[in-house]
């Protein structure tokens, strides 16, 4: 009986497949099983986002603690959907602002304004719009919630990546020009890796900002209508409104488990992976480590996936050539530039002027322009709280952030702790805050600063850590060899090294403090409500009662304060960081 013989080509292919299959181990089985389980959970939980929904028949949620695992999964799905949107927005918006001088003059001030608009301002418009877009389906309300969380994440990430793009190391910029890289290749090979560390750390911070506003995005009160989405935030909000400390405790425990789990499985591996993009001439003695990343590196799936996607990457690189070559002239014709600037300015000013006239006409017809007087005065009280918060946070958290960033071992210990603190929604602490303020007689006008700090101070800490981590090891070793210590070390190395990252943290902390005032200037627990004098309380009260003229006036005034502060202080510091302190 003859044995069938394989053709040489087919035999070699079978041998390669068999050899690669033999390389797989139990690690690959665990990784594959984890991915499949994750996909199953997403599909299973995501199915609950498209159930039928009638706005007039909205009911509360079941506060049985046994439902918390499901609520946690729903909240996580919203958070990661918002993070994906934020990343896409960041790459496009920051790139456009960094590579077009004219667009920069519009996009960055627009980002200032968007950052200053409180989440309740977005919800006022989004809820009605998405419900109309997806009638009789919960998906519309889910989209509004995800977009609201997106507004608490995207601005910080965009500011951070924009600053990384405008401070690309000079030697890398010259390399790109001399090698004739396409703009597509320059982005993926130089610009994105150069900003990876800042992007990861600010993504982590922005994710924490999303947790902070989780209650507002799942337990929505707009125009005397109340909408409830299943999630940990709505569970906690319902328990707080009922004064049920036991269920508030269950929500706090669930939130802590979620934050630690996301940190261990997602952010910690990303931080360790981003270390490969640090620009330095000597390798650090201590590097960031992650058990999950080490486990994945033992798997053959990443290499197998790389081989499968190689043709797609090559096709994308070829298609990316349509964006042109990185051969921008260092000097442009001044006459052409001036004419283009004038035409661009006329178009933009015309559009902005038309919008402002239309807004003023609406407010004049509804309540009169005197509606701006009260929020302008209340804004001064909130501005004072913001300035105090940023000043104290800078003095306290910058030295701590530098200490953590210089020590990989300390980073591994401190990162989950810091992220839990940064991610903790202030609403969860309202019972304790109410009790403390009533017992001590401390006015919420002062205590509100502490609550605002829960949502804003961490931007300064995270950016200080990221800035310290990005300082090349060889510079630190040179300072050690020269015996530079104390204030001289701060003046010569640390302040110049972390200054660009600190400015990003400062501008987002300032904007975050204004946004946090919405939930920090009104504290409610059970039947007790404390209210501070400020613009945040004004907007929150107007939103709850659907007073659109006051909502528009409050948001416009808050935008005016934020943009004015950014123009007078933070933008100048940005230019200083770009011109003097870029590596």
Image (cartoon, grey):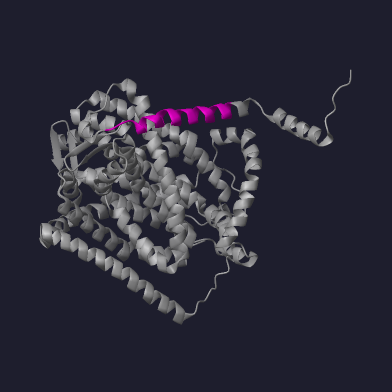
Observer able to see residue 418? no
Specify whether 268 is left or right of 30: left
Region rendered in magenta = 30-53
For the stretch drawn in magenta, the main secondary structure is helix
Residue 124 location, x and y as percent?
24, 46
Specify whether 78 is left or right of 482: left
Residue 11 location, x and y as percent?
80, 32
Specify whether 280 is left or right of 337: right
Observer able to see residue 451? yes
Residue 254 location, x and y as percent?
35, 28
Q: Quarter of the image for the N terminus: give it.
A: top right
Circle count: 0
The residue at 15%/34% (across/down) is: 439
Report the residue that reaches farthest toward the right: 1
* Residue 54 within the magenta-colored segment of the rendering: no
* Residue 39 within the magenta-colored segment of the rendering: yes
């Amino acid at each position: 009986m003859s044995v069938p013989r394989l053709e040489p080509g087919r035999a070699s292919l079978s041998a390669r497949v068999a050899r690669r299959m033999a390389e797989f181990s139990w690690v690959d089985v665990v990784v594959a099983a984890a991915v499949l389980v994750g996909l199953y959970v997403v599909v299973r939980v995501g199915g609950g986002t498209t159930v039928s929904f009638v706005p007039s028949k909205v009911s509360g949620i079941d506060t049985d603690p046994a439902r918390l695992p499901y609520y946690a999964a729903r909240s996580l799905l919203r958070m990661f959907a918002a993070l994906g949107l934020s990343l896409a927005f960041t790459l496009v918006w920051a790139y456009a602002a960094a590579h077009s001088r004219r667009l920069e003059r519009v996009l960055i001030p627009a980002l200032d304004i968007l950052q200053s608009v409180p989440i309740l301002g977005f919800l006022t418009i989004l809820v009605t719009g998405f419900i109309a877009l997806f009638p009789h389906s919960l998906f519309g309300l889910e989209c509004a919630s995800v977009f609201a969380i997106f507004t608490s994440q995207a601005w910080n990430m965009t500011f951070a990546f924009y600053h990384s793009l405008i401070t690309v190391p000079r030697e890398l910029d010259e390399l790109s020009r001399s090698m004739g890289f396409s703009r597509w290749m320059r982005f993926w090979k130089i610009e994105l890796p150069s900003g990876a560390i800042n992007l990861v750390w600010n993504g982590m911070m922005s994710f924490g900002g999303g947790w902070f506003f989780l209650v507002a995005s799942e337990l929505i009160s707009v125009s005397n209508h109340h909408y409830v989405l299943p999630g940990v935030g709505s569970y906690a909000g319902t328990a707080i409104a009922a004064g049920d400390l036991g269920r508030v405790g269950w929500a706090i425990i669930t939130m802590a488990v979620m934050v630690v789990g996301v940190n261990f499985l997602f952010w910690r591996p990303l931080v360790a992976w981003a270390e490969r993009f640090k620009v330095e001439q000597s390798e650090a003695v201590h590097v960031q480590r992650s058990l999950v990343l080490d486990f994945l590196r033992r798997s053959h799936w990443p290499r197998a996936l790389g081989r499968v996607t190689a043709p797609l990457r090559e096709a994308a690189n070829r298609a990316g050539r349509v964006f042109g070559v990185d051969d921008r002239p260092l000097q442009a014709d001044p006459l052409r530039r001036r004419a283009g600037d004038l035409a661009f300015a006329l178009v933009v000013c015309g559009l902005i002027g038309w919008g402002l006239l239309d807004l003023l006409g609406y407010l004049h017809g509804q309540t009169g322009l005197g509606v701006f007087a009260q929020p302008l005065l209340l804004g001064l009280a909130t501005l004072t709280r913001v300035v105090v918060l940023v000043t104290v946070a800078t003095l306290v958290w910058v030295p701590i952030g530098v200490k953590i960033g210089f020590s990989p071992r300390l980073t591994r210990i401190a990162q989950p702790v810091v992220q839990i603190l940064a991610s903790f929604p202030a609403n969860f602490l309202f019972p304790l805050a109410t009790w403390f303020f009533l017992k001590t007689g401390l006015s919420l006008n002062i205590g509100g600063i502490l609550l605002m700090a829960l949502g804003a101070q961490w931007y300064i800490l995270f950016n200080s850590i990221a800035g310290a981590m990005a300082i090349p090891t060889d510079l630190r070793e040179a300072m050690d060899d020269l015996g530079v210590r104390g204030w001289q070390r701060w003046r010569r190395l640390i302040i110049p090294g972390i200054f660009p990252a600190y400015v990003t943290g400062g501008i987002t902390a300032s904007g975050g403090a204004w946004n946090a005032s919405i939930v920090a200037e009104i504290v409610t627990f059970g039947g007790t409500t404390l209210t501070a004098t400020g613009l945040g309380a004004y907007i929150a009260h107007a939103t709850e009662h659907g007073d659109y003229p006051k909502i528009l006036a409050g948001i416009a005034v808050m935008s005016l304060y934020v943009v004015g502060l950014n123009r007078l202080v933070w933008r100048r510091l940005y230019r200083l960081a770009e011109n003097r302190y870029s590596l």
